[in-house]
């Protein structure tokens, strides 16, 4: 597997330190990464900011630092339109733009999400809309030699059985999975067996580790605490959390996965958002992957 650093980790969200896109690429190289995954939105790789000249300049920065960019991360929510505003078409246009930019940077994958459930449409309506929109995204991305990777993140098809059904419904050669450990771990799926089963359909995985804390609400009339759900989940340096990544990666390897494994800090992380802590977390993941999962 090939370690990759996701630029969202240094985008300044969640109170963390922030780097420009060019500074992030330099940071990744200095930390020892040979590949980066770029967030397809501001402050990083927004289609609004990337004309041909700026794309060429960014490719030169990647080449100068000896870093590849195999993956662009799109941010999508493909629930049905509930007004006259064509949100689906806007997202298709965004993903197509990222595919065009990605191809010029040497990328081969654009990562997308499915949809969050909402009161405006039924789960089955949302499912069908996700299928329809993703199929068109795949058509348009394929024209640039780009594969769409569907990440198991949003509500629709988040369970692994459902995700395989969704992939079958899309039925497109340019559609694969971006299969991660954190969602099945939180929901109680067996990580080894699930990863092994999903591996043949998986083109990338994005990784972060977490601890989970039970939550309670004090009930004065009972002079006691009531258990509440769900647990609080907090990001921690890789290897310090509850997710069994040894089992997850073993299952991926057994299933034949040999693609990119990206590290992300996409929430507040133990140790704080200083540059030193972000750097330490990025190094920790690379060391963990190098020791346990040689390429």
Image (spheres, rainbow, N blue to C red):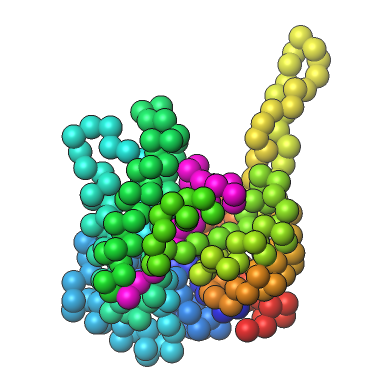
Residue visible at 37% across and 59% down in the picture: 74
Q: Nearer the viewer, residue 91 or 55?
A: 91
Residue reaching furthest to the top: 221
Q: Which of these two is toward me, 46 or 82?
A: 82
Residue 235 lies left or right of residue 10; in this view the side is right
Whether residue 277 is visible here, answered yes or no, is: no
Q: Quadrant of residue 207?
A: bottom right
Taking the magenta stretch, the answer to whether it contains residue 221 is: no
Residue 22 lies in quadrant = bottom left
Q: Position of residue 173 (x, y in %)?
A: 40, 67
Residue 215 in sight in this render? yes
Q: Position of residue 48 (x, y in %)?
A: 21, 61
Residue numbers of the magenta segment: 145-163
Residue placed at 47% from the left, 55% from the top?
A: 168
Numbered label tally: 0
Where in the figure is residue 146, as x and y percent of width and height? 35, 72
User: In the image, is 17 to the left or to the right of 95?
Assistant: right
Residue 118 image position (x, y, % from top left): 41, 32
Q: Residue at x 75, y 13 (%)?
A: 220
The quarter in which the N terminus is drawn is bottom right
Front residue (pair 65, 198):
198
Question: Residue at image x 30%, y 86%?
Answer: 60
Q: Quadrant of the C terminus?
A: bottom right
Report the side of 61 relative to 237 (left or right).
left
């Amino acid at each position: 597997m090939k370690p990759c650093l996701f630029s969202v980790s240094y985008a300044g969200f969640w109170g963390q330190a922030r780097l420009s896109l060019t500074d992030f690429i330099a940071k990744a190289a200095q930390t020892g990464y040979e590949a980066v995954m770029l967030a397809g939105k501001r402050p990083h790789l927004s289609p609004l900011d990337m004309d041909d000249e700026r794309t060429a300049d960014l490719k030169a920065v990647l080449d100068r630092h000896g870093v590849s960019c195999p993956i662009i991360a799109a941010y999508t929510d493909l629930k049905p339109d509930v007004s006259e505003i064509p949100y689906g078409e806007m997202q298709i246009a965004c993903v197509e733009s990222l595919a065009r930019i990605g191809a010029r940077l040497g990328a081969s994958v654009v990562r997308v999400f499915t949809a969050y459930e909402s009161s405006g449409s039924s789960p089955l309506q949302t499912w069908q809309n996700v299928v329809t929109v993703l199929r068109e995204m795949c058509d348009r991305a394929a024209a640039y030699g780009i594969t769409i990777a569907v990440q198991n993140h949003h509500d629709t098809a988040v369970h692994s059985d459902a995700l395989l059904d969704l992939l079958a419904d899309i039925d497109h050669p340019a559609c694969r999975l971006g299969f991660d450990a954190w969602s099945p771990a939180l929901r109680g799926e067996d990580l080894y067996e699930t990863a092994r089963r999903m591996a043949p359909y998986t083109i990338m995985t994005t990784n972060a580790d977490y601890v989970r804390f039970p939550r309670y609400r004090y009930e004065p009339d009972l002079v006691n605490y009531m258990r509440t759900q769900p647990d609080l989940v907090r990001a921690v340096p890789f290897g310090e959390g509850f997710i069994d990544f040894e089992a997850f990666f073993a299952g991926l390897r057994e299933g034949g996965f040999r693609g990119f494994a990206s590290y992300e800090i996409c929430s507040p992380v133990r140790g704080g958002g200083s540059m030193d802590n972000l750097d330490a977390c990025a190094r920790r993941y690379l060391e963990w992957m190098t020791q346990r999962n040689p390429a």
